[in-house]
Amino acid sequence: MSGPIPVDNGGDAGNGLPKGSSRVQKSVQRGAVPTSSRAKLVTLFLVGLSFALVFNSEYDPLLACIGFSVLAYVITATLIPVLSPDFVRVGFVGRDLGKKHRPLIPETMGAVCAVVYLITLFFFIPFLFAKFFVTETSGSGNREHVLDTATLHKGRPLRMFPHSKLAEFLAALLSSFSMLVLGVADDLFDIRWRNKLLLPAIAVLPLILVYYVDFGVTLVAVPPVIWRLFNPRMVSNSAVPVVDLGVFYYIYMLAMAIFCPNSINILAGINGLEAGQSLIIAIFLLLNDAMYIVPGRILGLHPPHPATEAHLLSTYFVLPLIAVTTALLKYNWYPARVFVGDTYCYFAGMVFAQVGILGHFSKTLLLFLIPQIVNFIYSAPQLFKLVDCPRHRLPKLNTETGLLEPSRVYFDVPPKGAELLLLTSLGKLKLLDLERDPATHVIKSSSNFTIVNLVLTWAGPLREDTLAIVILGVQAGCCAVGLIARHTIAPAVFGRDNL
């Protein structure tokens, strides 16, 4: 939970301090704890394990990805405390408004995760295609191959090499890098909401272009029950009907790219919430991928599913995200020693969008984003200025009890018309806590429109870590229900499961 830093005149500064803030730098350095011998042994073990997995004898890219992910965790967990004073020195620092003394904490540490993530995947590229290099290039799998003069001039065509897969991988990395730049710019300049809303759509354009060229499927399955309403002649044993959305499918993917990064950024404000929800979503994405990969590819129970390669590609992006997010959460959990910043929210959200697009399971992804969807709908009146929206909507600390309470928006002018109707309706449904004037019954204030404040409205004041656990528990429960529904209810509705 961070907020603006007060300057000497009592006003508000940005999210940082001027360069050379020695007081904050010293406090960060004093917070560093020397590494114990046990921690060093664990680190050495993890590094050794990662190298063993990366350089496996089978050239298995999945094992290599697991190895790189372990290494990414070690590097991220090491760099965050080391680089924290440097982030403070250049002004990336914010106050933790959820603590009594509002300590100054290094901010934008999500940039460290994003950079480690991208570098990890850059190094992973040769290992992803190692088998193709072995079988297609001279000097390894086919040393007997002799290059003729024409080949020397024109280059050697790699007929078996999956150029489309490489294009998808590089396009996804480009989209992630674009969101990293946007996140850092937002943390630096505090870009207005309306100006940055559509920027993720621009960042995902290379990925959508590759999707159009290499895949181009815009068909959507329709439940047979609905299809029969428009086509009564359809027999019961027919294949699942589909509808071609055409250009509207690409608009839908652009909307996904806009929603995912911003949804993580909206559901925020307390220690561990941004990284925690991202970690839970990533884990359930990995579980969904495993349901396609493990039975056929690993256990050999049946031939590999046709979607195995798509879900493997998704796994290659999700595993390093889980690794760097776990390391970040270690320092961002209550009481937070670092803040993730908008950089992490945009970066993690874009990873979710791109795996949904490349893995061809965007509808499944939406099942894992139910809390984010609910939070967006619930926040819409303030986001779109139907109701006044303060700069910070994060919960308010009661310094006497040490518990968080719902933050409020105060109305200088009594609500009227649609605003009054909306507030009154949500108040009757117990979705808002309204404060009225005892004499006139005019609405003086309302709790802010976020599910973080809604939980506090329903449950009462809570400790910050307890509040985070409750919300993350809801996130995990919704993801579990979504995963079960995807592979139980969906087959009943559509007539079959694609496993």
Image (cartoon, rainbow, N blue to C red):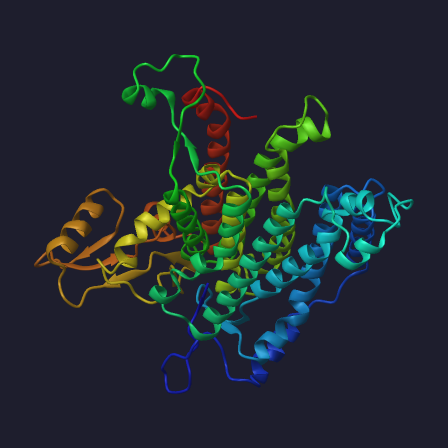
Instruction: Using the image, determine if residue 419 lies above or below residue 222.
Output: below
Q: Residue at x 38, y 59 (%)?
A: 395
Q: Is 309 on the left or on the right of 98, as rendered?
A: right
* 75 up-or-down from 139: above or below: below
**Residue 107: horizontal and vertical position, in percent?**
53, 69
The residue lying furthest to the front in this view is 150
The percent position of residue 94, horizontal first and vertical second, equals 49, 72
Q: Quadrant of the C terminus?
A: top right
Between 162 and 168, the residue placed more toward the observer is 162
Point out the residue furthest to the top here: 236
Find residue 329 and report its horizontal and vertical position in percent.
59, 55
Relative image position of residue 179 (x, y in whole percent): 51, 61
Is residue 277 among the parts visible in the rendering? no
- Judge whether 263 appears above or below 285 on screen: below
Q: Does residue 366 appear anywhere in the picture?
A: yes
Please tell me which residue is depicted at 65% across the width and 46% down the height of the picture.
316
Q: Nearer the viewer, residue 84 or 241?
A: 241
Depth order, front residue of 84/58: 58
Which residue sits at x=67%, y=26%? 295
Count of labels in the image: 0
Please report the residue visible at 71 percent of the width from the left and 63 percent of the height from the top.
78
Is 197 on the left or on the right of 164, as rendered?
left
**Left or right: 50 with respect to 333?**
right
